[in-house]
Amino acid sequence: MDLNYWGLIVGAATFVIIGVFHPIVIKAHYYFGLKSRWWFLAGGIVLSAVALLVRDLVFSILLGVVAFSMFWSVKEIKEQEKRVEKGWFPENPRRKNGGRKLNDNNK
């Protein structure tokens, strides 16, 4: 009986990729604020296109996983903003306005 390990390898790689993106989102929000979501969106679009062009199936799958992790990070950056407002994560004191737009209430 031949065993196919690729499913387990891709599953483990997906687990690692998702785990790596968690601190990346936290750091991106800390240093760049909400603006960082555009970099995640652009990266997701680029990697999606690259995944379509790569001939190797496993590499294409992994690129797709990274691409969609980047798309999910766009949402998570917004969620991270709420976590910072609740005090669950620190706000970067060196970043003006915490990356948020100024309005009349916080000038």
Image (cartoon, rainbow, N blue to C red):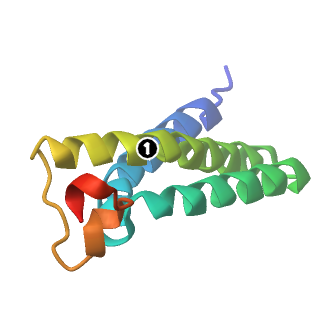
Residue 46 versus residue 5: which sits nearer the camera?
46
Decide if residue 70 is on the left or right side of residue 21. right
Q: Name the spot of residue 68 as percent of width and height, x first.
A: 61, 41
Q: Is residue 4 above or below residue 78?
A: above
Residue beneath the point at 30% across and 46% down:
80
Residue 20 image-quadrant placement: bottom left
- How far across and down, in percent of the image, does residue 27 sit? 31, 64
Q: Position of residue 36 (x, y in %)?
A: 48, 62
Side (left or right) of 59 relative to 82: right
Give the residue at mark 1. 18
Q: Secondary structure at mark 1?
A: helix
On screen, 95 above or below 58? below
Q: Residue at x 36, y 46 (%)?
A: 19
Task: Decide which of 47, 42 is in the foreground and name it.
Answer: 42
Binning the other alpha carbons within 10 Å of mark 1 as few (below 14), some (14 to 19) or many (20 upward) gives some
Q: Residue furthest bottom?
A: 94
Q: Amino acid at mark 1?
A: Ile
Residue drawn at (37%, 55%) of the image: 25
When the figure is inspected, residue 98 is found, relative to residue 15, above or below; the finding is below
Q: Left of 85 or right of it: where is 20? A: right
From the top left corner, tell me how far across and down residue 83 is, in percent: 21, 42
Toward the front, the furthest residue is 104
The image quadrant of residue 54 is: bottom right
